[in-house]
Structures are given as structure tokens and as C-alpha cells.
Amino acid sequence: MFGRAVSRKVFWSLVESALLHHLQALEKLPTDVIIPPRLVVSRKSGEAILEQLERPVEPTDSMKELFEDD
């Protein structure tokens, strides 16, 4: 009856909850133990990532099933 709309609400509620917990943890941790997220890639890897973003491949049946709303 509610299907996809409820699933999206639940999903975003979980995302919001996870972000709030993450931010609370960051406030409690000493600043010297927090490592800023950073990803360093070579030019070749960067170009490969860009190509994949510009031309995404069709998801596999397994991926479609994983993200399927019931």
C-alpha cells in the first residue's frame, strides 16, 4: 500500500540518524585523533574514475535486486 514512499522515508531517517551519531562522535573525540577523509589517486586512476562517472555501466541483476523496493 505505502511501498516505495515508506521505504524512502525509512532510508532517509536512517541516513539522518547515522549522520547525527557521526557528528556527535566528532564532537566528543579529541581533534588530534580525527583524520580528515581524503582520497588521493594517480592521474591515470582519476581519469578512469571520471570515465566511469561519465559513462556508467548498466547495473547487474544482483545489484538491481539489492536495491529493489519491495
Image: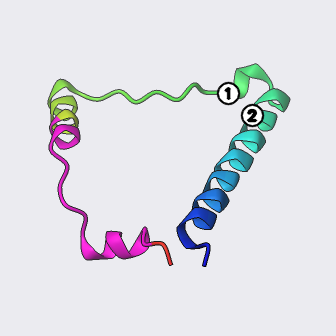
Residue bounds of the magenta highlight: 51-68
Pointer 2 and pointer 1: residues touching (CB < 8 Å)?
A: no
Q: Position of residue 22 (x, y in %)?
A: 72, 40
Left or right: 41 in relation to 8: left
Please tell me which residue is depicted at 19% across the width and 43% down the height of the picture: 52
The part of the image, by quadrant, that contains residue 23 is: top right
Q: Quadrant of the N terminus?
A: bottom right
Q: Which of the two discs, 2 and 1, sits closer to the camera?
A: 2
**Mark 2: few/some/many CA within 10 Å (<14, 14-19, 20+):** few
Number of on-image labels: 2
Q: Which residue is mark 1?
A: 34
Colour pattern = rainbow
| Helix, strand or loop under label 1 | loop
Q: Which residue is mark 2?
A: 23
Label 2 – label 1 distance at C-alpha: 12 Å
**47 magenta-colored:** no
Q: Position of residue 12 (x, y in %)?
A: 63, 52
Q: Position of residue 37 (x, y in %)?
A: 52, 29
User: In front here: 41 or 66?
Assistant: 66
User: In front here: 37 or 60?
Assistant: 60
Question: Which label's residue is closer to the chain start, 2 or 1?
Answer: 2
| Above or below: residue 36 compared with residue 22 | above
Residue with the most extreme right position:
28
| Above or below: residue 17 compared with residue 68 | above
Please tell me which residue is depicted at 58% across the width and 63% down the height of the picture: 5
Looking at the rendered structure, the kind of residue marked 2 is Leu
Please tell me which residue is depicted at 19% across the width and 49% down the height of the picture: 56
The part of the image, by quadrant, that contains residue 64 is: bottom left
| Helix, strand or loop under label 2 | helix
Q: Position of residue 11 (x, y in %)?
A: 61, 58
Looking at the rendered structure, the kind of residue marked 1 is Ile
User: In front here: 36 or 1?
Assistant: 1
